[in-house]
Image (cartoon, helix red, strand yellow):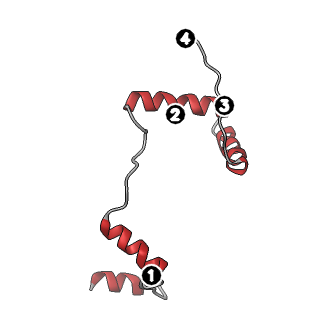
Amino acid sequence: MSKVQTSLRLDEDKFCEAKEILKNLGLNFTEAVNIFTSMVVATKGLPFDVKLPTKDFQKSLDELEMKKGKSFHTTDDLFKDLDS
């Protein structure tokens, strides 16, 4: 199998953090990119879901941004509200 060299433009901080994580997994960046590329080919798409938010989810996000979402002091209060 022949190899091709490519270049990427990445956020430096994220690149360094990703390299450290991959190192802890026993991989280098090139190996991880090769795994990702193989998975794209195997799945004929991205190897994870990429979706637009549903209308309900987007509405919830909008409410949070406008600070109209509910807030709770404790998780018990949250669960009581969910049960009602």
Residue toward you, 7 or 37? 7
Mark 4 or mark 2: which comes first in sequence? 4
Mark 3, residue position: 7
**For the residues marked 3 and 4, what is the alpha-carbon distance in whole angstroms?**
20 Å
Residue toward you, 30 or 81? 30
Specify the quadrant that holds the C terminus: bottom left
Q: Amino acid at mark 4?
A: Met
Q: Nearer the viewer, mark 3 or mark 4?
A: 3
Q: Amino acid at mark 3?
A: Ser
Mark 2, residue position: 36
> Quick check: marks 3 and 4 in contact, CB under 8 Å?
no
| Residue at 40 percent of width and 28 percent of height | 42
| Residue at 34 percent of width and 86 percent of height | 80
Q: Amino acid at mark 2?
A: Phe
| Residue at 36 percent of width and 73 percent of height | 59
Q: Which mark is residue 75?
A: 1
Mark 4, residue position: 1
Dot 4 alpha-carbon crowd within 10 angstroms: few under 14, some 14 to 19, many 20 or more: few
**For the residues marked 2 and 1, what is the alpha-carbon distance in whole angstroms?**
38 Å
Q: Amino acid at mark 1?
A: Thr
Specify the quadrant that holds the N terminus: top right
